[in-house]
Amino acid sequence: MEMEGLLSTEEGTTYHRTRGPTMPQYKLTYFNLRGRAEISRYLFAYSGTKYEDHRIEAADWPKIKPTIPFGKLPILELDGVIIHQSLAIARYLARETGLAGQTPVEQALADAIVDTIDDFMTLFPWAEKNQDVRKKAFDDILTNKAPELLKDLDTFLGDNTWLVGKSVTWADFYWEVCSTTLLSCKPDLADKHPRLRALRDRVQALPAIAAWIQKRPQTVM
């Protein structure tokens, strides 16, 4: 029998579904942001997998950074192993939770969509402190580069329910996660692509995802 629950701790919040004695003990460490860890949180939430959502404050990062492999977050700890790189973590979780795609071809297609979206997201100067420089760069990317990405994604999706195959995959989750951030910068960004907006709505309407969105900490991004 599977049992669901929630446990608050000093370090974070643990969302769990007990499956058996061999279930790995997961600890996801990232800043108190959605950012590059949110795709993994979606995978945990949708699958009901137990994990510790360990969030650190930016002020504590200089002290913690030397203890982190390769000096970057997020990291995923499981049974003494540390995995770094956000998409490596998410890809592992997608495979473990059955959300990577139903066949090797579907898995490759889902990976390709995620990588395509991620390539676009890395164009933004997220760490830029000069607000004028940051705004100019964001405006340029959203105005001149985003339309091509959205057109290609819309064509790929077509009239299908999900981006890959007949069921939801982590590619759909990644679109929702990233589009939420993009729409906060430019609310009308996807107005010309109702199918992409509808896909975002479908992901948000999944009960486990809707529950996570409702209870997750409210952060700037």
Image (cartoon, rainbow, N blue to C red):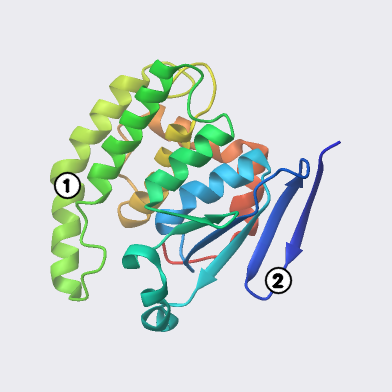
Instruction: Answer left or right for 53 relative to 72.
Output: right
Residue 220: which quarter of the image?
bottom left
- The residue at the point 75 percent across, 46 percent down is 17
Bin the neighbour count of mark 1 within 10 Å (Cα to Cα): few under 14, some 14-19, many 20 and up. Answer: few
Q: Name above or below for residue 69 compared with residue 174.
A: below
In this rendered view, identify the residue nearer to me: 90 or 139.
Answer: 90
Q: Position of residue 211 (x, y in %)?
A: 67, 48
Residue 175: which quarter of the image?
top left
Q: Position of residue 185 (x, y in %)?
A: 31, 56
Quadrant of the image containing the N terminus = top right
Camera-side mark, 2 or 1: 2
* Amino acid type assigned to the residue bearing label 2 in the image: Thr
Res. 202 in view = no
Quadrant of the image containing the C terminus = bottom left
Q: Name above or below for residue 90 compared with residue 27.
A: above
Which sits earlier in the primary sequence, circle 2 or circle 1? 2
| Residue linked to disc 2 | 9
* Amino acid type assigned to the residue bearing label 1 in the image: Thr
The image shows a total of numbered marks equal to: 2
In the picture, the disc for residue 143 is: 1
- The residue at the point 30 percent across, 28 percent down is 153
Label 2, secondary structure: give it: loop
- The residue at the point 33 percent across, 31 percent down is 113
In the picture, the disc for residue 45 is: none
Instruction: Answer left or right for 16 relative to 59.
Output: right
